[in-house]
Amino acid sequence: MIAAIEKSKLVYVLNRDSEMKLAISSPLEAHKNATIIHHAVSLDVGFENPVFAALEVDYSEVDQDSTGEAFNKATKMLTYYELDLGLNHIVGKWSALTDTRANLLVQVPGGLSISSSTLDGPSGVLVCCEDHIIYQHMNVASHRVPIPRRQHPLEDTTNGLIITAAAMHKMKVKTTFYQSHFTIVLNPIFQHTFFFLLQSEVGDLYKVTIEHEEQEVKSLTIKYFDTVPVASSLCILKSGHLFVASEFGNHVLYQFTNLGEDDEPVIASTSYPQLGMADPTSKLPQAFFRPRPLSNLISVDQIPSLDPILDAKVLKMIPNSESPQIFAACGRGPRSTFRTLQPGLEVEESVAHDLGTQPNAIWAIKSKEDVPYDSYIILSFLSLNKTLVLSVNDDTIEQIQDIGFLDTVPTLGVQQLGASCLLQVHPFGIRQISADKRISEWKAPEGNPIVGAAMNKRQVVVALSSAEIVYFDMDLDGQLNEYQEKRAMGSRVLTLGIAKFQTVDKGRLILLSAVKIKQYRSSLWIQTALWRPADDASMTTFVNIELQNGVLLRTVLDPVNGQLVDTRSRFLGTRPVKLVRLQINSKAAMLALSSRSWLSYTYQNASHFAPLIYDGLDCASGLSTASTLQGLLGISRNIIRIFQVTKLDQKFKQESIQLSYTPRKFISHPNNRYFYVIESDHRVVGDEAAKKKIEELHQSDEEIDEAALQLSSAVFRRPRAPAGIWGSCIRIIDPLKSKTVDVINLEGNEAAFSLALVSFSAQDGRLHLVVGTAVNTLVSPRSCSAGYLWTYRLTEDGAGLELTKVDDVPLALVAFQGRLLAGVGKALRIYDIGQKKLLRKAENKDFPTAIVSLATQGSRIVVGDMQESVLFAAYKELENRLLIFADDLQPRWITGMTMVDYNAVVASDRFGNIFVNRLDSNISDLVDADPAGAGILHEKPMLNGAPYKTKMLAHFHVGDLITSIHKASLVAGGREVLLYTGLHGTIGILIPFISKEDIDLLSSLEQHMRAEQDQLSLIGRDQLGWRGYYVPVKGVVDGDLCEMFKKLPGSKQHGIAGELDRMVGEVVKKLEQLRLMASDI
């Protein structure tokens, strides 16, 4: 059953067709006019006709009653609907009154067990109400128990408590019967039992059990279980784990250590008259428990989540970083964090040791093919003209000299050959060491040393200084044999590459590749590495070419004619590129070394190329040991490092700083790189208020549970308070050291809502922090007893300077021409600093509702209104006026905004839309040319608004409430993009097109991809309808949809590419270029 909020309920029957594919039938209607549905759930009835339960409120009488009395007397009903499979019809089966504050239904097991003739449970539902849990079912007695509350000296017990998430788990319990005086089991019987885990809105878990005999319920019990983050969903796994999909913040996986059988207190329905249903309209006496740290669960893993992102900034603050970082204020309440997101893969380092001298190359190899781990680490020192061999045993590394390697020369290459041979290539020859320590050598011609080498399990290719290539392969006896014909290349060979061994004939590929690579012989240095992708079925061999200028070229080797086709380039860094072949998750991978290290790997059947957030490496190799199965060896100057890349699914390295309240906004200092964060939470007891209340309780000699006061607020949250009570602070953060520098707690029920850094001209450009606060603020309707602008001079102690009182909540502040521009309620004001407080210099009160965002450029001001979209204003210094001259035709609830240029603005609304509006350039010039603004004042308003209107250039539905938009360049030398962050943790970018050809190509590709969305969308959503959910899509191409072109079958790709008059590789290359020009990931 799928139920809408009002009236509609549809029932679908799922069957399987002749091909055993899931098929869905036409819906059956169970509509009911003038009805609001709060929740719906299916009942467990075994093999009988399906039954559904719904919480419904009939408002037909409320609509007819103008006095409001019918509204107060409205009742909530628990209704059963039965689907008659024989008649293919759904009917109402049963209906009964339930608590008017019910909000959630939980299915109770019932019906015959599959493995026995007994019933799994009594069936029915648990009705979760405010402060109570009720068991209800058709034609049986109901049970009711109170929801236990925390016993805390600061908790407001008048606030109701509701259940927000639930999970049920069935278990098999073995019951055994014994003969008297014997210990032999006669008849073991498996009985089915179950329990529920319900979570309250503050995160407390309750274990609920039902004692029953067949379908008769004897007792309903509830007890406190543990406290976890507030979840949007709970899932109990058969492996004994509990997954908590957190409503806000990281998702957590817990393991059960106990089922809480001995926990106290236990509240049972049998402890109350008539099973708690003596008077269903009145509340039961409150029950309390003492919160405690986890005792039944233990946290075993977390999935990082940015949900929600309240504000973000894109800045380059980390030293020696080549791309900017994203700083985000995330979370809610005491679980909030300030996060630094650095694009790239996070590295876990295990060993770092100074060698004293810098090696020029490093390898890790096995002693035999069937050995699971690497046995040796080989270091080549060109400056010392030597080779060092290290043995790896049980994670211990020591130097050895008895494996047969020549240590008086530098090494050019190392390989484990065949089943048990080792190979060393040095400038003067090739040394093959067999398992019994026999050594076979091939010496290079005198005066013609080896300058390069490439090898695999059975093949070796070396390049001589005479520009000749010599090829070797291994015979069945394990002996390396020289191919008699040498290939003269005609010019100096700089590097060699060889693919993974398949057959002996593959040796010819190397020669064909080398011939083609010669076309890059101009002033560039070239190195190649051939490797096979993860999808071996494609039989595609890629050639990666490293250049001296820091560019990596990747091209495809045509298996028919040996041509290099589909060449793509990418700038990796300022140093020459070096390539290393690796294995990551048992799949082919490649490490590219430049001023930054990059990893090319395959994850979830998709190819990825991302930078490592690590020191620059000079050379590297893969390493496999008992503790580091797929690790990496690296040399950074004189230091050898052993590290791992474990989080391949996370493209950002995250560093977090814990906050006290929900972060609202933050701003960065232009010089010392500090961040100033304002935090505030509604309906909580703040730190300063809590201290005062505890002192009052001590003075009145009341008994206080000190253990409850010591519990971490990050886990148990702060005590709840009535509406209008706030906790707030101002925090100074050093992101480079990941620490809090200072915290200023706001007292007197004051909350911070906005801030700005202002260089006041009256103070010789001295920087000040201005924070907008309000006292006794109510959210709905928005009101406050007083508003203030706190002004802080930025000194070492951050001492306060002035306090300016305003008449409404200051929701937006920004620096403007050496003064402060403030949005206070629906008024736009300019303040300048005085001797004792800020002085109001100009004001405009003609804005529609409330100003929530501001952006300025020159004398141009763009104002984001809470309900009426974006307005353009101008400051006329000659007359000291703030004038509104343009607005939007369409009203919007603005949540984020930034200026694209002087005449254009990009903004987002509360319904997940992002749009670009532009002011006509002629109107802009006309406004700027009027020094006094007289022309604007005398213009006739249009449509009860400003005299001029902006034009919408682009509109797109992203599906998330966008909280911030930034214009930034995410790649050195790349184009500027619009980066946005969303409430659900979304980070996305809008890339501007610079050519008409790109627009035509990708627009056509998007149209073709819409026809294939049934194969790509998990839920069958219509892409055009979704992206134009409120307003039709305009001027935006869905890049996410276009990038799914790479996931289509090959036949579909060739068909679409043919329609576009392009090759498949050209389409994929264009998609990759757009992404690479915008970001590193």
Image (cartoon, grey):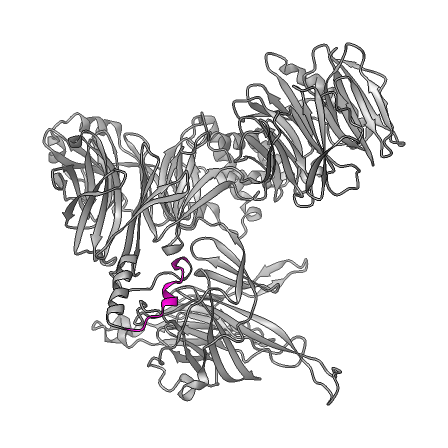
Residue furthest out toward the bottom: 180
**Which region shows up in magenta?**
702-714
Q: Residue at x 24, y 60 (%)?
A: 724
Q: What is the quadrant of residue 1063 in the picture?
A: top right
In magenta stretch: residue 795: no
In the rendered image of this protein, does residue 672 appear above or below residue 692? above
Given residues 1078 and 1041, the one toward you in this image is 1078
Q: Residue at x 47, y 33 (%)?
A: 1079
Given residues 398 and 59, the one toward you in this image is 398
The image shows residue 153 at horizontal and vertical percentages of: 32, 69
Relative placement, left or right, of 730 versus 642 is left
The image shows residue 944 at horizontal and vertical percentages of: 17, 44
Total marks in image: 0
Can I make out residue 142 in this image?
A: no
Can I make out residue 932 in this image?
A: yes
Given residues 225 and 174, the one toward you in this image is 225
In the rendered image of this protein, does residue 596 appear above or below residue 756? above
The image shows residue 1027 at horizontal and vertical percentages of: 43, 45
The image shows residue 328 at horizontal and vertical percentages of: 39, 43
Given residues 725 and 38, the one toward you in this image is 725
